[in-house]
């Protein structure tokens, strides 16, 4: 953020740690790699939530893409990003 103070940050998160683990297993990750990646993901999510209020849950690809596109469009137009509803705080 220091290099790009006007950057818009949007955090994409999995629906749950269980879903993230299932996705990684499906990709063929070893259990050792899976545990390492899950731990890193937890750390990155914690940091991301401190950096931005805009959290999008990646539970449905089309919906998640539409949500990110909406955030970007409001940002480009200069419309307040909270839009009255506030940012989504994914689980």
Image (spheres, rainbow, N blue to C red):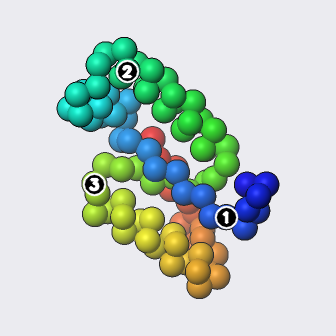
Q: Reading the chain from its start, which is encountered first: label 3 or label 1?
A: 1
Please determine whether, in this image, residue 84 is positioned above or below residue 77. above
Task: Please indicate whether residue 54 sits to the left or right of residue 90 in the image.
Answer: right
For the residues labelled 1 and 2, the Cα–Cα distance comes to 32 Å
Label 3 crowd bin: few (<14), some (14–19), many (20+), radius 10 Å: few
Q: Give the labeled residue for mark 1.
A: 7
Q: What residue does disc 2 label?
A: 33
Q: Residue at x 64, y 82 (%)?
A: 78
30 or 44, which is in the foreground? 30
Quadrant containing the N terminus is bottom right
Q: Residues within 10 Å of mark 1 (few under 14, many from 20)?
A: few
> What residue is pinned by disc 3?
60
As measured in the structure, the alpha-carbon distance from the residue carrying label 3 to the one carrying label 1 is: 25 Å
Which mark is nearer the camera, 1 or 2? Answer: 2
The answer to which of 45 and 37 lies nearer the viewer is 37
- Mark 3 or mark 1, whichever is nearer to me: 1
Residue farthest toward the right in the current orientation of the protein:
2
């Amino acid at each position: 953020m220091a290099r790009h103070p006007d950057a818009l940050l949007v955090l994409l998160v999995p629906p749950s740690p269980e879903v993230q683990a299932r996705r990684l297993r499906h990709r063929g990750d070893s259990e050792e790699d899976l545990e390492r990646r899950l731990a890193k993901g937890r750390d990155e999510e914690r940091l991301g939530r401190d950096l931005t209020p805009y959290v999008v849950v990646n539970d449905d690809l089309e919906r998640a893409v539409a949500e990110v596109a909406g955030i970007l469009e409001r940002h480009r137009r200069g419309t307040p990003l909270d839009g009255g509803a506030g940012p989504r705080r994914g689980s």
